[in-house]
Amino acid sequence: MPDSVISLSPKPRARVQAMKEYHPPLGNRDALRLDFNENTVACSPKVLEVLAGISAGSLTRYPERESVEAIVAAHLRLEPAQVALTNGVDEAIHVLFETFLDACDELLLPVPTYTMYEVYASVTDASIVTVQAADDLQFPFERLLAAITPRTKIIAIANPNSPSGSVATREQLIAIAHRAPHALLLVDEAYFHFHGQTVQDLTGVLPNLFTARTFSKAYGLAGLRLGVLAGPVGSMRWVRRVLSPYSVNSLALACLPAALEDTAYLNWFTGEVMAAREEFEIALDAAGVRRWPSRANFILVHIGAQHAQFVQLMRAAGVLVRDRSSDPGCDGRVRITIGTRQQMRHAVESLNQSLATLRIERKPE
Ligand SMILES: Cc1ncc(COP(=O)(O)O)c(C=O)c1O
């Protein structure tokens, strides 16, 4: 394209120009994928049956979400008006921020945490206030409380958190909601199924509490893009003004009831991950690799200055892991998703080999 044409093209908003580019390494992932905290096996076979039965006729219609929202609400023991389906939790975050964050507002984030909070907040005119976790990466409860100001509009907490795997307790989350009655507390429970503790039952009880859940992790449906946002009815009305009525597609809507019904599959997968997590922790300790306690389907480990080579060596051995070195306070750290016990035994072999290679590289003859 000639330069003259480029120079005529309109500039995006200043906030967008100031945004950092974010390109998660999603290309070329034909390997053991321990890099995005996905389900490493499959979704429920019942979901695949539904997909196989999708008719051409059903694809000609716009997606109809209301009846499925009612099913999800009943499953979560909530009212339909308290629940909205979204195109992944990412859309829930995006829409919540678009709905509530104004120019003078602050989004309060304990960090390190899920990258997309910052990405979506950067598109709004609000400022982002971060509270850095200490080296143990435990939830910085007291310092988060101290960082609440009259301008705090949303506090977003992933529980369990990524990439650390650490958790906030129910009591801490309730205390935060009480301390900031003028703000919204978003508790992102993307990894709920590996942790088992929730505050979602307090929807409508705590007037400023939102929770989000995803079908991308334990349910194995990351490709369908399906999330659930739950919140007080009054606030959800505002969210629905911004949320696209079409953003959850009809394939996802058709599959969701089958995914919810197949609790046997979900329990099998989460049980397998939790058993594998324990085995993997033992293997990391035996290898002398520092790790952070995790209640999710991943573990953050310390590799040190050779983190990038480590990720490359693991890739060469057919195992994808995620370099989190550029996350705040995470220099030299790598996040490893937990799959099945069998998959993790393979990962341990690759890990030990990669560490041995790094040691040789560090001490040349
Ligand atoms: C804390 C957290 N929230 C949300 C998401 C994204 O969920 P979804 O695939 O439903 O958009 C992730 C994905 O890694 C995550 O780690």
Image (cartoon, rainbow, N blue to C red):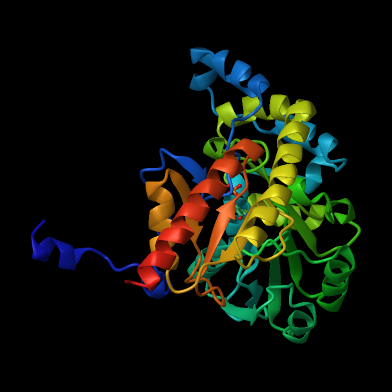
Return the x and y of residue 363 as percentages of the image width and height: 38, 73
Return the x and y of residue 8 as percentages of the image width and height: 18, 65
Q: Residue at x 74, y 72 (%)?
A: 139
Q: Residue at x 78, y 34 (%)?
A: 267
Return the x and y of residue 172 as percentages of the image width and height: 85, 71
Q: Note whether 286 is above or below 86 in the view shown.
A: below
The foreground one among 245 and 364 is 364
- In this picture, residue 306 sits left or right of residue 150: left
Name the image quarter holding residue 342.
Answer: top right
Q: Note whether 169 is above or below 314 in the view shown.
A: below
The foreground one among 24 and 155 is 24
Name the image quarter holding residue 174.
Answer: bottom right
Q: Residue furthest front?
A: 365
Instruction: Decide if residue 229 is in sight here.
Output: no
Q: Note whether 357 is above or below 276 in the view shown.
A: below
Q: Give the position of the C terminus as an image quadrant.
A: bottom left
Return the x and y of residue 145 as percentages of the image width and height: 79, 81
Q: Residue at x 82, y 49 (%)?
A: 196
Q: How many marks?
A: 0
Q: Residue at x 42, y 69 (%)?
A: 306
Q: Note whether 364 is above or below 87 in the view shown.
A: below
Q: Give the position of the N terminus as an image quadrant.
A: bottom left
Instruction: Decide if residue 88 is in sight here.
Output: yes
- In this picture, residue 214 sits left or right of residue 81: left
The foreground one among 316 and 295 is 316
